[in-house]
Image: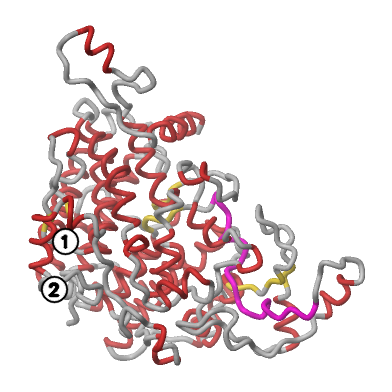
Amino acid sequence: MKKIYQYITMAVIAVVSLAAVSCSSDDTMTSINTDPSKAPSIDPNAQLTTAELQTYGDLGMVEIYRNYLYAFDQQLMGCWNTTNYGGHHTVDNNEMSRVWTSLYPMAVKNIVDAIEHADDKPNLKAVANVYRVYLMSVITDIYGDCPYSEAGYGFIKGIANAKYDKQKDIYDDFFNKLDSAVISIDASKDKVSGDVIYHGDLAKWKKLANSLRLRFAMRISNVDPAKARTEFEKALKADGGIIEEAGDDACINYMTTSMSFGQESYSDYRGNRLSQLLFGNDPANNPSYICSTLFNKLRDSGDPRTYRIARFYYDGLMSATGTDNRIDLTDEILGKGIKIEPCDPGAYSWDAWPTGYTSDLLTEMAKSNSKINPALNREVRPKLANNFLRTDNPGIIMTSAEVDFLLAEATLKGWNVGRGSVEDLYWQGVRKAMSLLSDRYGCKAVSDEEFNVYKEKNGIGHTDAQKEESINTQAWILHLTNPAECWANVRRSGYPQLKSPADYGWGQYLTGGKEIPVRLCYPVLESSYNKANYDEALDRMGGTDNWHTPVWWDRQK
């Protein structure tokens, strides 16, 4: 662990930039032109650390999840950012471009450079290739066609304007890269020391690579079902196996860091900044209101996760540095039968206030604390529990619960899975998804009794369509803390079937169209600095950069 934190420190240094080396052959000129504050090279292990940590540790980048994806998926709603951008379908290029303009110049650049300089470290090279595939999947699933084969090679090969590869070609290469990585991993060779996911456990990296192949195979199952089945079945037979238990889950390990939104927090990747954003920089208007779509699904089905995920807080005393002063009114609200009104898609937290109530607990506390105002009724809006607002929360890449859902759907499709029935795999996934909350977020564990009661009251369905809906709705709940994968799977599967905010009465605010967007637009600067490649990509999309144009794999059966 000490070694890992050494690499985290190195990664923070690497965030500044990759080293620049003078091209002059003259020793004197080389000395003059070399920046003494920068190292001539970076340990590829440290570059791996940087790429991993940036995934959820880049405060500027993960705003795209809070501002758009959580609203598109209708998991969170109500705060200004989430509702104004995603909830109101507001086109804002600066916001939409965050993943593109953050990952390409940093994580992708570092991981490509690490691969190029790891010829004497075959295991590191293989691990870096697996992670490069994962990073690029996040980018292409959000934007569609994008730079891939030439991405990150500006310094190495002098490619200033990378071409946009077709998403189909990108996915074809994903399968090849993951297959090659598994084959090349050899425990007798170099150790991977900069890994903050598996701490260099190569057997687990094989499992992740094979499991990602399952994810990507299912992703293309509507547009290319034959190849999807072939790749899925190949992954199941590949050396090393797949992620099957919680101990194999791919989670980035983060540290407890300051909740401050100062400038330093934008370049310090050591903490989970998505959790920090969900905590928010305005304690009185914490941006983690649960959307009615998610809350009602949990509550109405009697899901034991409901009040592990959602709580009711009085935030009048909450500080800007933590949740210690929050007053939890959940038990009182439930005990009194207070009407609960979570924010509908498109609604702000201050719109359509629910009927307030006078809290007995707050009234009693107000006698000795003049800062408490029992009349405030904002606390009856369900919010994310404190457990999800810590900077040391894991960054989820892939879990065994997701794998079970993928196996269940593949079995439903008639693919050669050989892992049990659709129902058994489904309930295994649900149970693991519930356990994830206690294993990774410190929530109270869901007991076997609670799970069994839930299982008795909620079947998977009778028809194939009902079963497919159940599987992917459970994946939607599971992916609450993995927003990129959540949005991708919702678009691919079509479940849960989400209604537009217009159907809830907010159509007048939907400036970017009433239908829920299905991709994000390219950065505007691409049309200037990489115009030829940008225009070629747009031609394949019908000539316009429209966020209602689906990506290649987003096709209904």
| Labels 2, 1: front one | 1
Figure quadrant of residue 141: bottom left
Would you say the residues marked 2 and 1 are in contact, meaning their CB atoms lie under 8 Å apart? no
Q: Which of 547 and 207 is in front in this view?
A: 547
Q: What element carries label 1?
A: loop
Name the amino acid type tagged 1.
Answer: Asp
- Where 206 falls versus 274 (above or below)? above
Is residue 278 one of those drawn in magenta?
no
Q: Can residue 133 be seen in this view?
A: yes
Up/down of 9 relative to 512, above or below:
above
**Image coords of residue 29 (percent x, y):** 22, 11
264 left or right, relative to 148: right
* Mark carried by residue 145: 1
Percent x, y for residue 42? 32, 27
Q: Which portion, as a residue range, is magenta?
A: 374-392
What residue is shown with label 2?
Answer: 223
Number of residues whose C-alpha sits closer than 10 Å to that of mark 2, classed few (under 14), some (14–19) or many (20 or more) = some
